[in-house]
Image: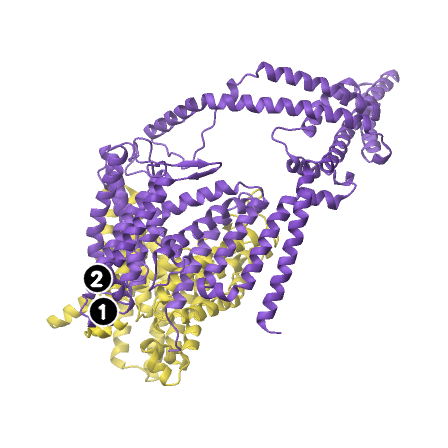
Chain colours: A yellow, B purple
Amino acid sequence: MRKTDVRTFLRNNAVTIMFVALCLVCMVYSGQSIPYVMYELFGRLSRNAFIVLALIIPIVAGMGINFAITIGAMAAQIACLWVIEWGVSGLPGLLLAAGMSVPIAAFFGFLIGKLLNKMKGQEMIGGLILGYFANGLYQLLFLFIFGNLIPLKAPGLVIKGSVGVANTIDLSTERGFKYALDGLWRVDFGTGLYIVCGVLALATIVSMLLKKSNVKRGAITLVGLAACCGLYQIPAVSGLFAMVQVPMATFLVVGALCLFNLGLMKTRIGQQFRAVGQNRTVANASGINVDRVRVIAIVISTVLASWGQLIFVQNMGSFQTYGAHEQVGLYAGAAILVGGASIRRATNSQALLGCILFHLLFIVAPSAGKNLFGDAAIGEYFRVFISYGVIALALVMHAWSGIQKKKNPAEALRN
Amino acid sequence: MTKNKVQRIVAVILVIASIALAVLGFVNLPKREAAEGQKILTDLRIRTLLNATGDGVVESYVAIAKKDATAAAKAAGGGMSAIREAVAKAEEETRAKYSNATTDYAALDTSALEAAVAEDEVRLKAYYTAAYVAEQAYIDEHMAEAEAAAAAEREAKIAAGEDVPAEETITVDMSGFVATEEMTGLLAKADQAYEPVGAALQGIYPVLDASALSTLKGTIQDIVYQQGDDFTVQYDRYMAAGSGAALENPVSAFLVRYADDLLYGALALLVCAAVVLFYELLARKLGIPRIIIGLFFILLCFMSLWYDLSLSTLLSNTLVRMGMNSIMVLAMVPGIQCGISLNLGLPIGLVAGLIGGLMTIELGIPGWGGFLFAILVGIVIAAVCGWMYGHLLNRLKGEEMSVTTYVGFSIVSLMCIAWLVLPFTSLKLRWPLGTGLRNTIGLDGTNFRHILDDLLAFQIGDFVVPTGLLLFMLVCCFLVWLFTRSKTGVAMSAVGNNPRFAEATGINVDKMRLVGTVLSTVLGAVGILVYSQSYGFMQLYTAPRQMGFIAASAILIGGASTSRCKISHVLIGTFLFQGVLTLGMPVANMLVPGSTISETLRILISNGIILYALTKSGGESRA
C-alpha cells in the first residue's frame, strides 16, 4: 500500500478506527472477562442488529439517518400491547404482533414521509423533532385512551389507582411472547459457527459452479471459512466463547434482512432510491417521482424498525411503556455511524460492524469508568456522550467534506 | 352564499347567543344572595339533612330490633350461638325493611325544621368566621417561626446530603392553636342552636333518641355550614349528596348556580365571534399557529374560571415564568438574524452560565455582587465557547440545525462527566457522601435566590408583579434591539437575510455570523442565571438538554421563522408559551387528576411548532 492510500484509508475510517481503539482501551481497563463480554455482546447484537439495518434504505435514498424510527418502535409497542391484551402468547403472538405492526408502521411511515418531503435538506433534525412530537401523541394514547376510553382487561396492563397503561409491560408471563424468536433454536457458539460456515461454503460452491462468481475469490472465502473453524478448535479460542448461546432464528432473520437490503438495491425501486439519493434534481429530470420514492423509503424503514423493536422486546422480556422507544433512534444512528457509514452511504457490513463496536463499548464503558475514575456514573455518561458525540462528529465531517468539494464560496452560501 | 356572508352570519349568531347568555347571567347572578337563592339552598339543605338523618333512623331501628331479639332469645333460653344468630337475623331483616323504605318527602311538614336550621346556620357561621380570624392571627404570629424551622430543616438536609425538594410551601404547625374565648362562646351558642334542630328532627322521625341525635350532630352541622362556605360551594355539596330532587325548579337553580360561568361563556362567545369575523385579517397578521395557540390560551383562561381557579394568581405566575424564560428566548434573536437559524446549540451558553453560578456559590459571594459575578463569569466563558462554536458553524453553512442540535447534546453529556469531576468543594454543591455535584442546587437568601423577582416587587390582590425581573427583561430586549439598529447589527441582519448580497456589498459574512453566535451564546448564559434565580434552583446534568428546544419553540410561537425574527416575537411568544403551560397544568389536573397531561402538552406544542417552522423553511419543490 502506498503512503497516500494509507492516509486516505485512515481519513475515511477515522471514526471506526478511533472507536476500535477506544473499545480496546475500555476493555483492558474494565477488568471484565472476555467470555462474559462475548456473552453480553452476542445478546445485544441479536436484539439490536435488526433495527440498525433498518436505517440503511433512507440513507441510500439521501434522507440521512432516519431518527423517526422511534415512531416505528412506537408502532411495535402498540401492537405488543394488544397482543398481550388478547393473550396470544409464544411464537403466534410474536407473528401476530409483527403482522399488526405492518399496517400501523406503514401508515405512520407514510405520514412521516409526507412531512419530511416538506423539509428537504432538514430531514434529520425534522425526524428527530418528529420523534419527540410523536412521543407526546404516544403518551396521550397510552395515558388517556388505552386503559381509559378503551378498557384493557389483561392483568398487569393497567394498575389500579394510576392513570393509563402501567409503566412496564411484562412479556415473560404466560400471556407474553418472551424468547418467542430467540428460544426457537438456540445452539452453543461452536455449533452455530459450523452451521454458518457450512451454509456460506455451500453458497460459495454453488455460485462457483453456476459460474456467477470468480473462482479465485470463492476459493479465498472457502479457505477463510475453514480457517475460522480451524481456529475454533484451539481451546484458548473456543474458551472465549464458552458462555455464548447463539439464538440462530434471530440471526437468521437479521441475515434475511441483509439479503433483503442487498436484493432491493438491485430492483427498480432500489435504483430509484440510489438515484434520488445522489441528486434529487437529476432524478426528477429523469422522470422519477422523487417525493414518492422518498415516502416508500421511509415506509420500508419504519416497518423494519417496528419489527426490530419487536425482536428487541421479545429478547428483553419486558419494556418500559413510556421510555423503551425514546433512545432507539439515537443508539441505532450512532451505531451505524460508528461502523463507518456516513449520512450518505451505508452498507450492511458497516451496520453490523458498527453494532458490534457500539455495543462492545456499551458493555465495557461503565466498569472501565469505575476502574479508571472510581465512579460507574462516569462510564454511563461517557457512553451517552459518545452516542451524541459520534453523531455530531459524523454530521460535522459530512458537512465539512461537502463544503470542501464546492470550493466556490458563492455556491456554498447558497446552500 | 359567499364565504364572507357565512362568516358574518355565524358571527351574528354567536353574538346573539353571547348576549342571551350575558342577560341570563346578569339576571341570575344577584339571585344568589336574594330570597330565591336562599330558597334553593334551604330546599337542598333540608333534603340533605333528611337523607342523612334517615340513615341514622335506620341505625336506630336496627339497634332497637337487636335489643329486642337478644331479649327474646335470652327469654327462650337459647345459648350464645342462638342469640348471635337471632341478632344477625333481626339486623338483616330490619335493615332490609327500612333501607328500601322511601320517605314521602312532600308529605313531611318541615317548617319547624327549617326555622331551627336557619338559626343554627347563623350561629355556626358566626363561630366559623371568628375561628377563621383567630386562626389567621395565629398563623401570622407564627409564620416567622415556621419559616425559620423550614430553613433549618433545609440546612440539615443539605448537610446530611439529602436532596432538597424543588417546591415547598411553608405551613404553620396548628397543634399549638388554642380556641379563643370568643370562639368557645360562639360554639356553645351554636350547640344550643342545635337542640331545636334535634327536636324538629325527632318530630319527623320519632324513633330517634338522644344518643342517636348526638351521634348525628357532627354530620348535621357539617351539612348546615362549613368553614369558607358560599352559595356555589354549598350548592355543589348538596348536589353531590344527591339532593337535587328537592328542587322545585331545577333549571332556574342551575342557572343561578352557574350564573358567573354564563357570563364567562358570553365573553368567550364574543371572542369567538370576533375571531370568525376577522379571521382573514388575523390569519394574515398573526399566522395560523399563533391563532391556534392564542385561542388555546384564551380557552384555558376561561376553563380556569369555569373550574373556579384563581386566574389572577395563574396570570401572575405566567408573568414570572415569562420573565425567567425570556432572556433564553432572546438568545435566539441574534442567531436567527445572523443566519445560523435556530441556535439549538444553546446549551453551550447555558452550561457557561451554570458554571458562573456554581463559582459564586463556591466562593460564597452574597447578594447582588454574587449575581453580577456569576453573570460576568458566565459571559466570559460563553464568549470564548461561542467564538469557537461560531468558527465551527462558519464551516458548516446550510447544515447548522442538525449539527447544532447534536453538538449541544454532546456538550450537555460531556458536562455531565464534568459535573462529576470538577473540583468544587462547597457542601451546598457536592454530595457529602459520594462524588460529584448535586442534581439540583438550591439557592437561598445568601445567594441570589429571587434577587430579580423580589426587587421592587409589589402586589395587587393575588397578582404579584415581579418588577425587577420584568425590568431586567425589558432592558435586555432594549439592548438587543439597540444592537440590531447599530451598524454591526444591520450588517448582521443583512447576512442573515441574503448572504450573497451581503458578501457583494463588502460585508464580512463569516465575521458577522461569528458575532451573532457569540451574542446568542452569551445571552444563553445570562438567561440560565435569570431562570435559576427565579426558579430558586440550579439544575445540572441533563436538565439543560431540552432548554434550547423550549426557547426555540417560544420564539417560533411568537411569530418568528427560521430566518426572520423581531424582539416582539420574543415577548409575545414567551408569554403565550409560558401562559399555556402555567394555565394548562392546573386545568389539566381538574380534568384528569394526578396526570402528566400538561407535560405531554408541552412536548406537543414545543415540538409541533418547530416542525411547522421546518416545513415552512424548505422543500417547496418536488425535487
Secondary structure found at label 1: helix
* Residue A171 is at least partly visible in this image: no
Residue B220 position in % (x across, y down): 71, 26
Secondary structure found at label 2: helix
The three-letter amino acid code for the residue at tag 2 is: Met
Which numbered disc flags the more N-terminal residue, 2 or 1?
Answer: 1
Tell which subunit mark 1 falls on.
B
- Residue A281 left/right relative to B37: left
- Compared to A364, does B101 lie above or below? above
Instruction: Tell me the number on the disc at residue B502.
Output: 1
- Badge 2: few (under 14), some or many (20 or more) residues near its Cα, within 10 Å? many
Residue B588 position in % (x across, y down): 53, 47
Q: Please report the residue visible at 14 percent of the width from the left and 68 percent of the height from the top.
A: A7
Q: Are marks 2 and 1 in contact (CB under 8 Å)?
A: yes
- Which one is in front, B77 or B544? B544
Instruction: Tell me the number on the disc at residue B512.
Output: 2
Question: If the image is split into quadrants, where does the N terminus of chain A sit?
Answer: bottom left
Instruction: Tell me the number on the disc at residue B543.
Output: none
- Residue B599 left/right relative to B452: right
